[in-house]
């Protein structure tokens, strides 16, 4: 089984607008995750995904 780990550090800077496309960095991260999941599922529908967030507590 192959495991792919991605880490994204999200703070107040992620809400800064990107002037070229009128989107925030957080919007770009969301779009990248959606593209990744759709691409993986188009390759193999049996792939599993897990997302976790870390703050003062962890959630997944």
Image (spheres, helix red, strand yellow):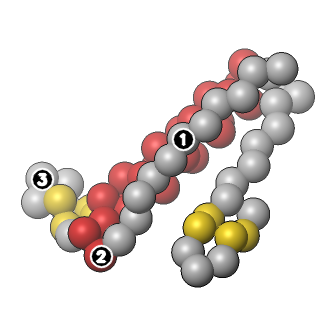
The x, y position of residue 21, in whole percent, is: 20, 54
Do the residues bearing badges 1 and 3 touch, measured as CB atoms within 8 Å? no
Question: Could you tell me which residue is drawn at 57 percent across and 46 percent down?
Answer: 34
| Mark 2 nearby-residue class (10 Å; few <14, some 14–19, many ≥20) | few
Say which mark, if any, is on residue 24.
none
Compared across the picture, whether 43 is left or right of 25 comes to right
Which residue is disc 3 drawn over?
20
Question: Could you tell me which residue is drawn at 61 percent across and 65 percent down?
Answer: 53
| Mark 1 nearby-residue class (10 Å; few <14, some 14–19, many ≥20) | few
Kindly state the secondary structure of the residue where label 2 is placed.
helix
How far apart in space, not on screen, are marks 2 and 3 (Cα)? 19 Å
Do the residues bearing badges 1 and 2 touch, measured as CB atoms within 8 Å? no
The first of marks 1 and 2 along the sequence is 1
The first of marks 2 and 3 along the sequence is 2
Which residue is disc 1 drawn over?
6
Compared across the picture, whether 45 is left or right of 22 comes to right
Compared across the picture, whether 46 is left or right of 20 comes to right
Q: Nearer the viewer, residue 56 or 22?
A: 56
The x, y position of residue 23, in whole percent, is: 27, 62
The first of marks 1 and 3 along the sequence is 1
| Mark 3 nearby-residue class (10 Å; few <14, some 14–19, many ≥20) | few
How far apart in space, not on screen, are marks 1 and 3 (Cα)? 25 Å
The x, y position of residue 10, in whole percent, is: 40, 65
Vertical placement of residue 7 versus 52, above or below:
above
Which residue is disc 2 drawn over?
12
How far apart in space, not on screen, are marks 1 and 2 (Cα)? 20 Å
The quadrant of the picture occupied by the C terminus is bottom right
- Tell me the quarter of the picture where residue 56 sits: bottom right
């Amino acid at each position: 089984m192959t495991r792919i780990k991605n880490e994204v550090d999200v703070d107040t800077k992620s809400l800064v607008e990107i002037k070229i496309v009128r989107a925030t960095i957080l919007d770009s991260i969301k779009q990248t995750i959606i593209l990744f999941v759709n691409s993986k599922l188009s390759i193999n529908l049996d792939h599993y995904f897990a997302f976790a967030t870390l703050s003062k507590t962890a959630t997944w």
